[in-house]
Image (spheres, rainbow, N blue to C red):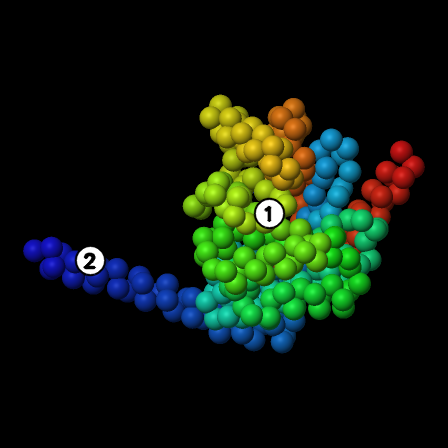
Amino acid sequence: RAKSEGRNLYRFFEPEMDAVVQARRAIEVDLEAALPRQEFDLDFQPIMNIASGEIVGAEALMRWHSPARGTVAPDEFIPAAEETGLIVPLGEWALRTACTAAASWPPGLRIAVNVSAVQLRSSGFARSVISALAFSGVPAAQLELEITETVLMDESKAVLKTLRQLRELGIRIALDDFGTGYSSLGYLRRFPVDKIKIDRSFIGDMANHDTAAIVRTVIGLGTELGIVVTAEGVETEMQLDMLRENGCVEAQGYLIGVPSKASDIQRLLKSRALHNRIG
Ligand code: C2E
Ligand code: MG
Ligand code: MG
Ligand code: MG
């Protein structure tokens, strides 16, 4: 009986699954052509030091402007690019483009770039990072690579070695979307991490007593371990006040600034730097 039920279930889902597979395949085909056609772009979102109110850097966020599909969000195309392996050249392009943009920012500001697990596992990754730095002239100390916990679930020696190598160059490693996925405190012990970014789902729910307790605990943990804690998705003054009261180091979110074009972020960073020097 179970067997026939299973078969019915399969039949029931089959047309739908087919549509999903076909849609994914179509995205993959379009993506492949998109890189040579220069349909990708980076937006930059400012990151603020909470205590000083100064902008300390920005995160590069990839955009796909597809003539056929319009602007596609990274959550929709990054998984497809990982599937085909396109994420490797695409990620290389992002690193280079982000570093080149950061080269014209006021000195000392950090550029954060997201790195997929597939990229990090690819053999030439460290080399491509070094080459992006050399190409742009951005010092290693100003580059921050954002990885997610899924990267660390892969316990491979190669990934650990790559992370160590990059860190020895002075590059910072940030653990993105902290608290989602299979968070394990063990990762913080085993892997070299300079920063934790608390996922925006926690920040958005800080009015909830239990969520606020979790956020406070993660901030305390970071402080104890000497790891910078950044809150993602800060949208209200109330959230920022709570984070400040609890000693969170950095904030990022629509309240501080939305992701913006390279030219706009450059203007913002320059005017803030000038303001800080005068003030
Ligand atoms: P992420 O690295 O956690 O980036 C933060 C995401 O939150 C961004 O979404 C940003 O636009 C959004 N966000 C920022 N502030 C707020 C806020 O106050 N409220 C809300 N509701 N959202 C906010 P985005 O740009 O759609 O990117 C989604 C994810 O795609 C990123 O999450 C990152 O994991 C991935 N991604 C983006 N660019 C790249 C890239 O160049 N390479 C790789 N491998 N992944 C990327
Ligand atoms: Mg990120
Ligand atoms: Mg995140
Ligand atoms: Mg994310």
Q: Which residue is drawn at 56% across and 39% down?
A: 198
Give the SS element for disc 1. Answer: loop
Report how far apart the C-alphas of labels 2 and 1 lie in the structure: 44 Å
Quarter of the C terminus within the rendering: top right
Q: Quadrant of residue 116?
A: bottom right
Q: Closest to the observer: 109 or 258?
A: 109
Q: Earlier in the sequence, mark 2 or mark 1?
A: 2
Q: Quadrant of the N terminus?
A: bottom left
> In the rendered image, is residue 262 in sight?
no
Q: Dot 2 corresponds to which residue?
A: 9
Horizontally, is 117 left or right of 97 in the view? left
Q: Is residue 64 positioned above or below 252 on the image?
A: below
Q: Which mark is on residue 119?
A: none
Q: Nearer the viewer, residue 214 or 220?
A: 220
Position of residue 125 measured from the top left corner of the image (x, y, whole percent): 60, 66
**Residue 140 visible in the picture:** yes
* Mark 2–mark 1 CB contact (< 8 Å): no
Q: Please state the horizontal and vertical placement of residue 54, each as a whole percent of the image.
A: 78, 38
Residue 137 in the image: state x and y as whole percent: 80, 63
Residue pictured at 76% horizontal, 66% vertical: 134
**Residue 164, located in which quarter of the rendered image?**
bottom right
Q: Name the residue under label 1.
A: 193
**Element under disc 2:** helix
Q: What residue type is labelled 1?
A: Val
- Mark 2 or 1: in front is 1
Q: In this view, does 60 lie to the left or right of 209?
A: right
4 lies left or right of 90: left
Q: Mark 2 packing: few (<14 Cα in 10 Å), some, or many (20+)? A: few
- In the image as oriented, which residue stretches furthest toward the left? 1
Observer-nearest of 256 and 54: 54
Instruction: Kindly identify the amino acid type of the residue bearing the numbered disc 2.
Output: Leu
Question: Exactly how many numbered labels are in the figure?
Answer: 2
